[in-house]
Amino acid sequence: MNTDTEPKEAFPYTPPSEEIREKYKQIFEMEGPLKVPLPKLIFDKMVALFFFILTSPMLVSLFIANWLEGVILPENRGPLFFYYYGVSHGKKFKKWKIRLIKESYIDKELQAKGDWHAYKNEWMPEAHTYLGKFVKKFYLDEIPQFYLILKGDMSFVGPRPLAVHHYERDLGQGNVTRKLVRGGLLGYGHVRKGTPEFGKPIYEYEYVHRYLNSSALGLLATDLYVIWKGVVVVAKGGGH
């Protein structure tokens, strides 16, 4: 697959600098995956369950809106959910999201393989359904990942899980954080979306450093900070 046509937004992460390699030398020497600390595991499940229940009425509304749009505009008809294969904790899993684009813009052959490339037309404004535009603006396409946290494929906070080919490229350029810890709905660097800091790997390494060296309360404080920053990003909208 020729990746020259991929939008750069699909893979903003840069290789680790020599400064990062020196500062976080311990992390580069580790073999993954690392065990999830029990307090973090309990916190993940409790918070994910809370948000899963909180957003359930919204999901019902999205189901209805998706059905109505398909009735009014048959070209926008299609399932509410889709998945592609991502990697979290060094393991491949189905990353479920809410569909943003019209079925005619989805590559069916690649979709059957769970390949991210099937949905790369997401960056074309004309490909979006009306519901998809609204969902994208407020990051509602991530709602199914509360289920993935409950299932154990993801954490609430951690390096954002990447599609398989992006993960392999990230690993190939020297980044190791995503093979060590569970991918997160929100990341220490990911909540900087829309700023020049987004995509800088130092934030992911700093998070893994705290994951390894903080007390249970210290790691909880970091996770709460990331969640708060994530809430602020969502409230601002924009769907970066």
Image (cartoon, grey):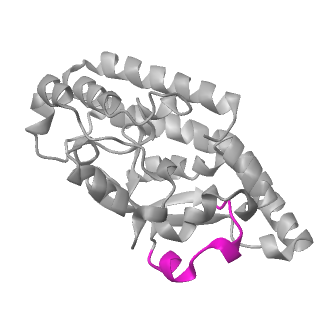
| Residue occupying image coordinates x 34% and y 28% | 203
Image-quadrant location for residue 198: top left
Residue 53 drawn at (x, y percent): 63, 43
Q: How many marks?
A: 0
Residue 106 drawn at (x, y percent): 61, 73
Q: Is residue 206 left or right of residue 148?
A: left
Q: Nearer the viewer, residue 196 or 146?
A: 196
**Location of residue 19 with respect to 13 vertically, above or below:** above
Q: Is residue 236 left or right of residue 11?
A: right
Q: Nearer the viewer, residue 120 or 215?
A: 120
Residue 133 drawn at (x, y percent): 75, 51
Residue 18 drawn in magenta: no
Q: Which residues are magenta?
A: 99-113
Q: Nearer the viewer, residue 56 or 158?
A: 158
| Residue occupying image coordinates x 19% and y 42% | 34
Q: Which residue of the protein is positioned furthest toward the bottom in this rendering?
A: 109
